[in-house]
Image (tube, grey):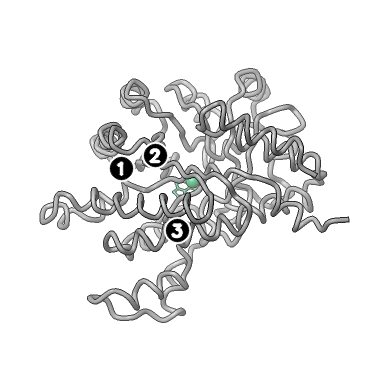
Amino acid sequence: MESIESFIRRLPKAELHLHLEGTITPATLVELSAQSPDARPMTFTEAEALYAYSDFTGFLQAFKTVVTELRGPAEYELAAWRMLQKLAEQGVRHAEVYISVGVIFRLRPEEDQADPDIFARIFAALERARVRGERELGITLYWIFDAVRHFTIPEAERVFRLAASMRKEYPSIIGIGLGGDERQCGSAPFRALYREAAAAGLRLTNHAGETTGPEAIREALGIGSERLGHAVSAIQDETLMEELKNRRIPLELNPTSNVRTGVCPALADHPIRRYFDQGLLVVVNSDDPAFFGATVEDEYRMAHDVHGFTREELQRLAENSFRASFLPEVEKQRWLDQIDSFR
Ligand code: ADE
Ligand code: ZN
């Protein structure tokens, strides 16, 4: 019989919860620093040290530190290209990738003054990588502009309005999202901005119930979030579970991330199995693979090894990944048909 590794790799998969900056490995940082004329080449040990954290707050800090290493368009293009190569190696055929636009703006106020078009140039570089990925690797890619919920509302407004205006030129900008620390800020303050983004044709994702309880998930649903990241705490609320099931709300689960940031004690404790068995629309994702040490392939493998997902059930997870995507219906159906005939 075919090995489980090969089965998972061949299975067409969509990755729906992946932060571009969280895919950058220490090796890529070393490569970037060696190419940069104004930076001293970094050693691997120096690069690796940037990834150290011991809890969720420390992880968010480390994530920001890695973002500061991306200085301009060339760095972003290489980071995106390396990400696409790694996705292709795992049999990922479509990805919807968060760009931490909120962090970029917060960290670059001086460059903003000196070069107001810096973000446009960074984004054009990301687009070059995306187009190359589609042409050379056969992967389709959508971008999600992510704001940081514990920064200010005007900062989120800037991110979302930029997504709305740039989407006219770049239809690959499919939606918006909110990351950051839910313990500091929920979703209700973003209600008007989410409504405005939806009216501009953007799809709405939201990190919810990662470090907080089920009420944060209700709040995220209450502002129109179409897809939820993490949603670990939904398990604590049966009525909410029913609602998520009946409304077919896709849950972008990231089990390894949750264990590594300390929000879930162990992989075996993650609610993925219970969600799946109760009929919730769950998708497995890697979130920030360079920080958490697990790829999306590893997450499928974990579902098999730790939660006893059979090959048929892994196929259902892969189907869910396309069903929950923001692809047009015809594209979704094309992938569902392929998975249906997959052996
Ligand atoms: N930004 C990147 N990864 C994140 C996560 N897991 N939660 C919140 N914000 C994030
Ligand atoms: Zn995330």
x and y percent of residue 143 in the render? Answer: 41, 42
Residue type pointed to by label 1: Phe
Q: In the figure, 3 relative to 207: above or below? A: below
CB under 8 Å between callouts 3 and 2? no
Q: Tell whether 28 sits left or right of 256.
A: left
Q: In the figure, 267 relative to 39: above or below? A: above
Query: How dense is the environment of label 3, judged by Cα within 10 Å: few (below 14), some, or many (20 and up)?
Result: some
Q: Tell whether 247 sits left or right of 62.
A: right
Residue at 65% x, 18% y: name it.
246
Residue type pointed to by label 3: Gly
Closer to viewer: mark 3 or mark 2: 2
Question: In this figure, which residue is indicated by the disc labeled 2?
Answer: 172
Residue 58: assigned label? 3
Residue 151: assigned label? 1
Residue type pointed to by label 2: Ser
x and y percent of residue 110 in the render? Answer: 15, 57
> Which quadrant does the N terminus fall into?
bottom right
Query: How dense is the environment of label 2, judged by Cα within 10 Å: few (below 14), some, or many (20 and up)?
Result: some
x and y percent of residue 327 in the render? Answer: 51, 32
Q: In the figure, 263 relative to 166: above or below? A: below
> Which quadrant does the C terminus fall into?
top right
The yes-or-no answer for disc 3 within 8 Å of ligand 1 is no
Quarter of the rendering containing residue 198:
top left
Instruction: Give the residue at the far front of this rendering.
Output: 135
Q: In the figure, 192 relative to 332: above or below? A: above
N-terminal-most mark, 1 or 2: 1
Residue at 46% x, 20% y: name it.
222
x and y percent of residue 193 in the render? Answer: 31, 26
